[in-house]
Amino acid sequence: MPTLVIISQGINFDGLNLASQCLLLKIPYVIVSQKAVDFYWPSKSDRKHMLETLLNAERTFFVSKHNLRLTEEQFGKRLPNAKVIFNPVKLSGGVIPFPKSNTIFKFVCLGRLFLLDKGQDILIRILSEQKWRDRPVSVSFIGKGDDDNALKDLAKLLQVSNIEFKGHVDDIESMWKEYHALLLPSRSEGLPLSMVEAMSAGRPVIISDIGGNTELVSESITGFIGSANEKSFGEAMERAWNLRDQWEQIGINASNHIANVIPENPEKDFAASIIEILKQRYAKLS
């Protein structure tokens, strides 16, 4: 029988059926939640046993304070065994030199092509406005996903030509040498690694006020914040555009902030938490 089972969930309750089996079999378990969604709540019939499963976990881990708070609100119960953790940043660390060119400003929208979560359609509608057509900007969509064709068809319908779909990119660190800023108009998030890595690389981020995003981003200091709709996110992009001569400094601010708040090796912190749980388990058995 396993000593401990680690269950990693896409959202905050889609793996609880597995955890409940551990509870039934008296196998110790921890739960990791990578996201919590405001518009997707547990069903009436499932809430009771899901809450029991959460409360009986050795520990429940969340990637943002927002995700923890929303989970508690969804189940109407505080989770005394909860802890907020960070995912590891894959870049080597430090500011990546800012692009020298200011004849064209290059944005990247980095993430899975999945509209329900990532909201890339919001961005395409904004870019269809005449002022963005007339400006020296380009936007690269990097990533793959179910909505690849839908986004391309939307861009074609709205005749948005200053964008490109580049698919998957392996070397994110080298990628950032080409781009000035990140656009992330998400409808739901945990704490997006694309945002954390962009900030770490020294790039301003234009993000939606969703998930844990604003736990790391301060308006006009480390990035720009809007809501996940065309009007508000468009206004955030406009504020960013008006301060484009400050982007390099805003990116430096962002990198310094990430260095101060994200542990150098968060995976080691997570491992230490697991080891501590195991030690406590062994102490109870001895």
Image (spheres, rainbow, N blue to C red):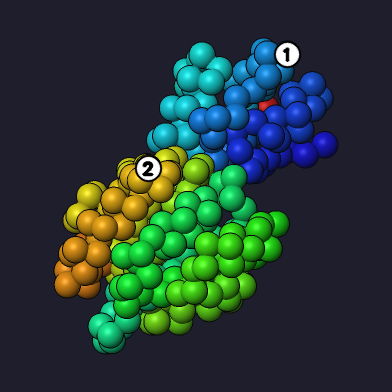
Query: Mark 1: which amino acid?
Result: Ser
Instruction: Give yes or no for contact between labels 1 and 2 (Cβ–Cβ under 8 Å).
Output: no
Element type at mark 2? loop
- Identify the residue under disc 2: 227
Taking the image as shown, residue 161 lies to the left or right of residue 237, namely right
- Identify the residue under disc 1: 45
- Could you tell me which quadrant the N terminus lies in? top right
Taking the image as shown, residue 190 lies to the left or right of residue 97, namely right
Element type at mark 1? loop
Q: Residues within 10 Å of mark 1 (few under 14, many from 20)?
A: few
Residue 235 placement (x, y as % from top left): 29, 51
Residue 224 placement (x, y as % from top left): 28, 53
**Residue 105 drawn above or below residue 186:** below
Query: Mark 2: which amino acid?
Result: Ser
Taking the image as shown, residue 106 lies to the left or right of residue 155, namely left
Q: Viewer-proximal residue, 184 or 83?
A: 184
Residue 23 placement (x, y as % from top left): 74, 24
Whole-number angstrom distance, CA of label 1 to CA of label 2? 32 Å
Q: Which residue is drawn at 73% across and 13% down?
A: 45
- Could you tell me which quadrant the C terminus lies in? top right
Mark 1 or 2 closer to N-term? 1
Q: How crowded is mark 2: few (under 14 residues within 10 Å), some or many (20 or more)?
A: some
